[in-house]
Amino acid sequence: MFQSNETIERWEAHPDGVVIEKKGELLLNGKKLLYDDKRNEWDGHAEGVVIELENKILLNGELMLWEGFDTWLTHPRGIVVQKDNMLILNNQKVIYEGEIGEWASHPEGVIVRKNGLWMFCKIPD
């Protein structure tokens, strides 16, 4: 269990507890420093934190996972990136290709809003 009497700017789930953002630092369970440098955005990940910095996606601020994208979301199986009209899992599998409005991660793929309807797209085998 994690408890804090200090103001937490943001938190995200992590396999080993919770990542919190406090005073610009990303801390695991409020103690272990995961990242404390500049960033545009961040999210929790099974192996630490995903950092967006200058149109690059970095794992723990070091390992580059992707460069050049429109949007991205973490996924239980890694990271889904939107590049033009494609949603791509871990820079390997195209989950969806076509018109993209809103979209969200789903444990088995992604959910895409197209023509006012939501549709499920499963990760290909």
Image (cartoon, rainbow, N blue to C red):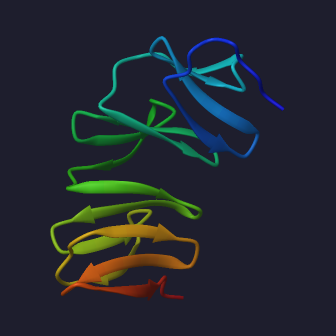
Drawn side of residue 75 relative to residue 16, left or right: left
| Residue occupying the point 20% across, 56% down | 70
| Residue occupying the point 73% across, 46% down | 15
Q: Quadrant of the C terminus?
A: bottom right
Relative to 28, residue 100 above or below:
below
Relative to 93, residue 3 above or below:
above
Quarter of the rendering containing residue 111: bottom left
| Viewer-closest of 29 and 78 | 29
Name of the residue lying farthest toward the right: 1
| Residue occupying the point 56% across, 79% down | 108
Q: Quadrant of the N terminus?
A: top right
* Residue 25 rendering spot, x and y as whole percentages: 51, 16
Drawn side of residue 1 relative to residue 97, left or right: right
Drawn side of residue 55 relative to residue 121, left or right: left
* Residue 98 rendering spot, x and y as whole percentages: 19, 84
| Residue occupying the point 31% across, 72% down | 87
Drawn side of residue 24 relative to residue 99, left or right: right
Relative to 66, residue 111 above or below:
below
| Viewer-closest of 24 and 84 | 24
* Residue 2 rendering spot, x and y as whole percentages: 78, 27
Tell me how many marks there are.
Answer: 0
